[in-house]
Image (cartoon, rainbow, N blue to C red):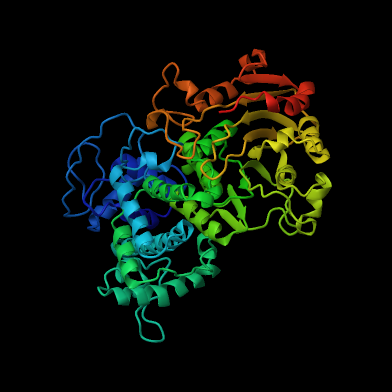
Amino acid sequence: MPVLADLVNDLIALIPEDGSRITNDQIRIALEQEAGEPLSEALLKDVKDRVVAMGAAEKPRGPGGGLKALGVSPPPRASAPSGNGRPRRSGNGATPATPSSTIAAGTTAASVLTGELRSQIDRIWDAFWSGGISNPLEVLEQLTYLLFIRRLDELETLEERRSQRSGQPMRRRIFPEGADEQGRPWSELRWSRFKELGEAASMYRVVGERVFPFLRELGGEESAYATHMTGARFTIPTPALLTKVVELLDAVPMEDRDTKGDIYEYMLGKLATAGTNGQFRTPRHIIELMVAMTEPTPRDVMVDPACGTCGFPVAVGEYLREHHPELLSDPELREHFNHGLFHGFDFDNTMLRIGAMNMLLHGVENPDVSYRDSLSEDGAIEEDKYTLILANPPFAGSLDTESISAKLQRVVNTRKTELLFMALFLQLLKPGGRAAVIVPDGVLFGSSKAHKELRRTLVEEHFLEGVVSLPSGVFRPYAGVSTAILFFTKTGRGGTDQVWFYDMTADGWSLDDRRNPLLPLEKLGPAPNVALAEGEQEKNNLPDCLTRWRHRQDSERERERTARVSACPRQKSRRRATTSASTATRS
């Protein structure tokens, strides 16, 4: 049974400060999520009455009931947006949802941000460039630190509000009370304080000499985010640039979980337009297709052993929130979602920091995002642990033999990274675990002994269920390599009956270096908001691919093997992989 005082404190923290209403339904959802169990009408009424009696809120007039801040006039009502966009979720399920534009989820984050928000982020980016930081990865890293600092202040403010309105002491302090050994107030480290210092030189001194050392000391905290701040470096070169960036960033609304995630995704998208740095990022609509085809469940344990900016874990989280909303009201599932479902490894600390921040801003409390060289002797140590793998690992050619895990080399005797990662995937999966991974065409068509042995293993010892051949321009502008998505399940005893093939020729975007959309944005992605008209599927194959995949066990089995889609019997699968390279349709 939840403690009444705790529920009162939780409700006080949920009251919007701008005078807007939190409805009875929103109160119920939020408090049941906090309590981890259903709450009776009588208990909810008691909690609301106590908050009102304390003077922490008042009951507004009109339908919907609920509560609002005492004595604060509600904000003016915004005009209703046009279109039929999907409703946005709030950060904690309590604040009113904000309608989004009619943009299909799973295309690009630029699609779901308003023009004003995009302009705000662009101005921040331009400020860095004109201020002397032109490396987009360094820009994103510095922004990640600043967003984390701002987030810490928001959490401290939330806890202070809870304490002040309930009359109870703060349950957790992030920033120490009082002053340091030199008599400088610890409160100056907070975003809301140092942004008001006035002089640019004073802010620069506080951030460089006090805030960043404080971030590095947070590494002892049991949090994926604090851990990755141990190597935080402050590289903003001038007080003027810091002042401008803080001012611009402070004006960006970050209250809503979806908005925070979309903003960060838009920033990540700038890596993809910056030449070779774009290798860290798989196109979002391809990620969304892979996630939809694997259909993650709330009880999965997923991993990306080359996670980069955590695009795959983020997409799995968004998929689960949309298709399994019960996970946020079930205490066991919610605990698993925040602390056990998501795992990602990388050997680039900058990527780990960016990836961890991406997860934080998408509402995952404590994912396992950690440093690991997945192919090394020390990295390839786990076996039979995960139920789902989604990955697009880097394929860097050949590695030095001494740097490769001996365990992986016993599975496939090679130094080629694409084959070693395939061996790693099979090692990491539990029996019955499934994977969707992007591989270069060499995995399908390579003629070496190692390539042939790997294909034999997939087909005869496990369940190779599907292959989606991607257009060769899907990773432009930074790579034109031909790739495919493999879908397989680890069984250890075979199971491959027929292999489903799909030859994708268009993903909705031009296949040149510009990668411009070929259709209106609401018609892009694997699940567009607006149905495609006749002939438009030739420009965006993703919805067709997803629909046919879902029928792979029935109608797709009868399709002729010369068509774009086919189901190939097992005895012909390996032969097709070596003969179809010259006949596969490419754009």
User: Residue 483: x, y in percent?
Assistant: 63, 36
Report the number of discs: 0
Q: Residue at x 77, y 27 (%)?
A: 574
In the displayed structure, would residue 271 be above or below residue 387?
below
Query: x, y percentage for residue 43?
Result: 36, 46
Q: Nearer the viewer, residue 178 or 585?
A: 585
| Residue 296 at x, y percent in the picture | 57, 37
The foreground one among 14 and 400 is 400
On the rendered structure, is 188 left or right of 535?
left
Q: Quadrant of residue 21?
A: top left
Residue 560 at least partly seen: yes
State the residue in front, 343 or 586: 586
Answer whether residue 9 is visible to the viewer in this image: no
Q: Quadrant of residue 156?
A: bottom left
**Along the line of sight, the residue nearer the viewer: 332 or 155:** 155
Classify residue 244 as left or right of residue 32.
left
Q: Residue at x 40, y 82 (%)?
A: 180
Residue in the picture at 20% in, 41% down:
78
Q: Is residue 543 above or below residue 257?
A: above
Q: Quadrant of the C terminus?
A: top right
* 273 on left or right of 502: left
